[in-house]
């Protein structure tokens, strides 16, 4: 069994602007100006959808390379909706997360429709972000220091 540990660090000051560090990489997460942020980066939900799209594309490239398929690229459009009452602290019986996520994948390839469907099924099966979203992944949030 090959195990890879993934670790990032997230730092936020007095506003919504949040710096996320993953190795030598830095990503800014923020809120729009009309929500009190500085709009210097995408929202956390945007980043979640970006992670899913990026994972689909990355796994797609891995599968295409492994199977020696002529895939020139991917275009993925992701959408989700949520009821914002709960996250804003308003009474709500709805969950605070996205109700559903839709990923529409266009594959730039000469493969026929059936082969593209087969490729997409394999990509989805191997995508860790999709797996984390579809299955219960234990999340532990604890206070330190």
Image: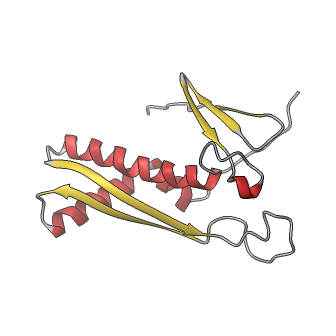
Residue 88 horizontal/vertical position (percent):
82, 64
Residue 25 horizontal/vertical position (percent):
53, 27
Left or right: 18 in relation to 114:
right
Q: Decide: is 4 above or below 124.
A: above
Left or right: 97 in relation to 55:
right
Foreground residue, 130 or 21?
A: 21
**Location of residue 105 by image quarter:** bottom left
Colour option used = secondary structure
Q: How many marks?
A: 0
Which part of the image, by quadrant, shows the N terminus? top left
Which part of the image, by quadrant, shows the C terminus? top right
Q: Residue furthest top?
A: 24
Residue sitting at x 72%, y 40%: 17
Residue sitting at x 24%, y 58%: 107
Foreground residue, 117 or 78?
A: 78
Residue 92 horizontal/vertical position (percent):
82, 76
Residue sitting at x 21%, y 46%: 64
Foreground residue, 116 or 66?
A: 116
Residue sitting at x 49%, y 50%: 50
**Location of residue 41 by image quarter:** top right
Left or right: 2 in relation to 89:
left
């Amino acid at each position: 069994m090959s195990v890879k540990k993934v670790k990032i660090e997230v730092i936020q000051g007095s506003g919504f602007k949040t710096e996320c560090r993953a190795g030598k990489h830095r990503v800014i997460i923020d809120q729009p100006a009309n929500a009190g942020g500085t709009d210097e980066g995408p929202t956390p939900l945007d980043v979640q959808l970006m992670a899913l799209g990026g994972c689909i594309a990355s796994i797609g490239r891995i599968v295409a390379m492994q199977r020696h398929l002529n895939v020139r690229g991917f275009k993925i459009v992701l959408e989700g909706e949520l009821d914002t009452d709960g996250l804003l602290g308003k009474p709500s019986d709805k969950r605070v997360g996205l109700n559903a996520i839709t990923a529409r994948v266009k594959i730039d390839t000469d493969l026929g429709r059936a082969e593209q469907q087969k490729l997409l099924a394999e990509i989805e099966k191997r995508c860790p972000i999709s797996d984390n979203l579809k299955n219960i992944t234990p999340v532990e949030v604890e206070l330190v220091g």
